[in-house]
Image: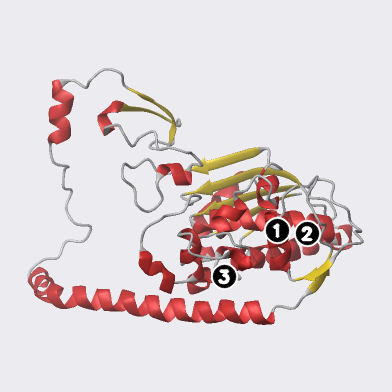
């Protein structure tokens, strides 16, 4: 059986993936979809690591249910993450690799098929100092966290070639990253979403880029090239023309349009106040929730080798073991060098 994990992003909800679920089910009827429901809305602020552990627990339960009484056998695993869900997927798959070694339900790490992220900020942002007072996920995205007292930010730790998170990605036959081509994108820049060291579009004008679209899926770009010749005078002149305004989505006739204009000075401050209120009401409970999780998570006996020599052949019985929490196990694997 092929199991496909769909993970939503920040302030997300499983219903946001309803269309993706419908398309996957229609095109691949034999595919079993798992859409995590343990973290929604403000719970996404709890951090990449805690949400990933929640995802793995749901995935583990789904596999146990499917394989109960030998009814089926999960042999393939694919993962799709949107926005923050892509980072949660990276952590979750690394943690799942640990379970494949130490848990009977994951006796073998399943033959992986496809790992896919869309608009996920794999590289950190080094701006916006105010995030220090926000949720854990924002601190992680801006390298302001100390991941489980490991001395490293989470994004740096999971990117280490020696880490279990890196090795787990190598288990997948296909690794796809989907990024947005937008010059000066300050949300998820191209190089961050596409696993690239540089942004090939940064030093070019829009007219210099010649895209090749995926057939029947424009404007999804398959590949592109850079024009070596300067654009014609007509093309330059056309690019200077203002964009066509197609009008508002909703037309307000008289007298409602006048009433709306008169209310704008009041509606805008109310909107700003509402966003600030939601920010405070969401981030503070999230920090309290994470603090509670760190203080009350029950320890479970998990063998921890003294060093990672071969992540594919870790011993199941090791004389040198430590009783650790599930999160501490991941930290130990990610930070120990060969």
The CA span between labels 1 and 2 is 7 Å
Q: Is residue 304 left or right of residue 136?
A: right
Mark number for residue 95?
Answer: 1
Q: Residue furthest top?
A: 229
Q: Look at the numbered discs 3 and 1 and tell me whether their residues touch, using CB distance below 8 Å.
A: no
Circle 1/circle 2 CB separation < 8 Å: yes
**Looking at the rendered structure, which numbered label has been put on residue 99?**
2
Between 195 and 222, the one nearer to me in the picture? 195
Q: Which disc, if any, is residue 39?
A: 3
Residue 19 in the image: above or below residue 255: above
Q: Position of residue 305 (x, y in %)?
A: 82, 57
**Residue in front for this viewpoint, 212 or 307:** 307
Q: Residue at x 41, y 43 (%)?
A: 190
Tell me if residue 140 comes above or below residue 20 in the rendering: below
Q: Position of residue 99 (x, y in %)?
A: 78, 59
Helix, strand, or loop for circle 3? Answer: loop
Give x and y (percent) for residue 248: 19, 57
């Amino acid at each position: 059986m092929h199991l496909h994990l769909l993970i939503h992003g920040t302030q997300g909800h499983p219903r946001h993936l309803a269309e993706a679920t419908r398309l996957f089910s229609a095109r691949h009827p034999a595919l079993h979809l798992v859409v995590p429901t343990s973290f929604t809305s403000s719970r996404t602020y709890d951090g990449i690591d805690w949400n990933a552990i929640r995802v793995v627990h749901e995935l583990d339960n789904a596999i146990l249910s499917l394989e109960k009484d030998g009814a089926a056998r999960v042999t393939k695993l694919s993962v799709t993450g949107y926005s923050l869900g892509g980072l949660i997927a990276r952590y979750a798959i690394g943690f799942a690799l640990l379970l494949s070694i130490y848990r009977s339900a994951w006796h073998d790490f399943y033959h992986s098929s496809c790992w896919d992220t869309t608009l996920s900020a794999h590289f950190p942002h080094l701006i916006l100092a105010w995030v220090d007072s926000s949720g854990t996920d924002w601190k992680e995205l801006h390298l302001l966290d100390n991941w489980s007292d490991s001395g490293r930010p989470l994004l740096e730790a999971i990117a280490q070639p020696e880490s279990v998170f890196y090795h787990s990605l190598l288990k997948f036959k296909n690794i796809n990253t989907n990024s947005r081509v937008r010059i000066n994108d300050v949300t998820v820049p191209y190089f961050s979403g596409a696993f690239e060291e540089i942004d090939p579009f940064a030093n070019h004008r829009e007219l210099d880029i010649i895209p090749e679209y995926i057939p029947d899926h424009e404007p999804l770009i398959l590949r592109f090239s850079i024009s070596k010749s300067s654009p014609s005078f007509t093309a330059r002149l056309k690019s200077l023309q203002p964009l066509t305004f197609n009008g508002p989505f909703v037309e307000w006739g008289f007298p409602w349009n006048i009433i709306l204009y008169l209310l704008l000075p009041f509606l805008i401050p109310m909107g700003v106040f509402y966003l600030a209120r939601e920010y405070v009401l969401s981030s503070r409970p999230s920090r309290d929730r994470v603090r509670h999780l760190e203080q009350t998570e029950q320890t479970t006996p998990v063998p921890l080798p003294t060093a990672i020599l071969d992540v594919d052949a870790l011993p199941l019985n090791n004389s040198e073991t430590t009783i650790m929490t599930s999160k501490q196990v991941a930290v130990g694997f990610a930070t120990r060098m060969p």
